[in-house]
């Protein structure tokens, strides 16, 4: 069965530079939640039009369970460069943009000091350099050919880079990764997404949760308790939020889940009867077998609440 949450390659081609970095940021925080990576080990600046040393994002970790990290993060230093739109890996001048400082791209004799500073630091410290190409899905004629192009460029600069760790994510790989995280992929798919299940950001607009949240002390304690139960994941299946209409239940749930690590694995269902009967439920179950998934079911009466206990 086709994963309806998986973006198409054509949808990814329309991702802008800002959106590409935002998507990567969400993906890294989602994986951090799963692989128990400290969120402070992740750095993805929002200012993408300033000098960044050749890197859009980085994750610096100790030893981690790389299978839990889904190949998105490796142990040690991880540096990511995002490219959207058309990018030709086979064109050397375009590869130079990713590797070299602007002042060095016309040189014929290159040294390690010509590399972007943070690219060089990554390579010299046994880190992993990941290139994320949203707009490129051209297949290789030979497996590993694209990585080899980058390795050859680096070897020309310094033969010590012959064993550099390079990863390339093309659009099809990005689509597969995003298909595991509906909360991240749904905004990319836009109107082609299932109409009754949404990312948490939709919840804010749909339920008119505007303005600053003046968090009562009692709510702070509840938010902390719910987050604690979610992160423990010891057989947790359901949390019921009960209270009189207008008391702030929806805003409480939104604020609880609107954190970098939780919003990326959270979905909002506004029509509980459709959530139960739609074929989509089987795909959500499949995803939840390996990826933590939080579904907020709004306007859930007693009958639907009973039926959802068998989700």
Image (tube, helix red, strand yellow):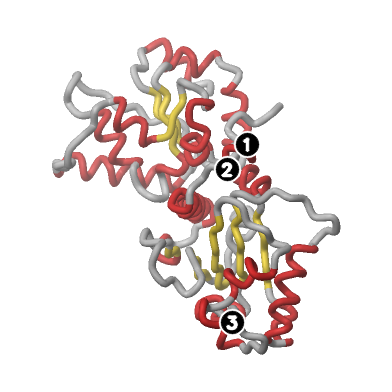
Q: Secondary structure at mark 1?
A: loop
Q: Which residue is mark 3?
A: 125
Pointer 3 or 1: first along the chain: 1
Proximity of marks 1 and 2: CB atoms separated by less than 8 Å? yes
Pointer 3 or 2: first along the chain: 2
Give the answer, above or below, for where 223 lies relative to 204. below
Q: Which residue is mark 1?
A: 8
Q: Is residue 67 visible?
A: no
Q: Which residue is mark 2?
A: 12
From mark 3 to mark 1, how far is it between C-alphas? 36 Å
Q: Secondary structure at mark 2?
A: helix
Q: Would residue 62 appear left or right of 241 to someone viewing this image?
A: right
Proximity of marks 3 and 2: CB atoms separated by less than 8 Å? no
Q: Quadrant of the N terminus?
A: top right
Which residue is outermost to the right?
142
Q: Quadrant of the rendered structure where residue 264 is?
A: top left
């Amino acid at each position: 069965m086709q994963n309806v949450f998986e973006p198409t390659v054509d949808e990814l081609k329309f991702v802008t530079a800002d959106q590409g970095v935002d998507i990567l940021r969400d993906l890294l925080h989602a994986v951090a939640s799963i692989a128990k990576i400290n969120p402070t080990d992740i750095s993805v600046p929002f200012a993408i039009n300033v000098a960044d040393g050749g890197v859009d994002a980085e994750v610096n970790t100790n030893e981690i369970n790389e299978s839990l990290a889904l190949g998105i993060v490796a142990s040690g230093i991880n540096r990511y460069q995002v490219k959207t739109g058309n990018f030709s890996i086979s064109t050397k001048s375009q590869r130079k943009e990713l590797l070299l400082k602007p002042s060095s791209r016309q040189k014929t004799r290159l040294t390690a000091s010509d590399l972007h500073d943070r690219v060089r630091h990554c390579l010299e410290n046994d880190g992993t350099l990941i290139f994320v190409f949203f707009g490129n899905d051209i297949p290789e004629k030979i497996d590993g050919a694209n990585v080899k192009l980058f390795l050859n460029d680096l070897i020309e600069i310094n033969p010590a880079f012959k064993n550099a760790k390079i990863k390339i994510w093309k659009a099809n790989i990005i689509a597969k990764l995003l298909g595991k995280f509906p909360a991240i992929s749904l905004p990319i798919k836009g109107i082609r997404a299932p109409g009754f299940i949404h990312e948490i950001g939709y919840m804010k607009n749909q339920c008119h949760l505007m303005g600053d949240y003046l968090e009562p002390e009692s709510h702070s304690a509840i938010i902390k308790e719910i987050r604690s139960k979610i992160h423990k994941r010891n057989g947790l299946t359901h949390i019921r939020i009960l209270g009189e209409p207008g008391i702030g239940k929806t805003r409480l749930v939104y604020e609880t889940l609107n954190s970098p690590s939780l919003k990326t694995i959270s979905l909002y269902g506004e029509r509980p009867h459709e959530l139960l009967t739609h074929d989509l439920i089987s795909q959500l179950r499949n995803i939840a077998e390996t990826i933590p998934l939080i579904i907020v079911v709004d306007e859930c009466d007693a009958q639907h609440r009973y039926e959802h206990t068998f989700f």
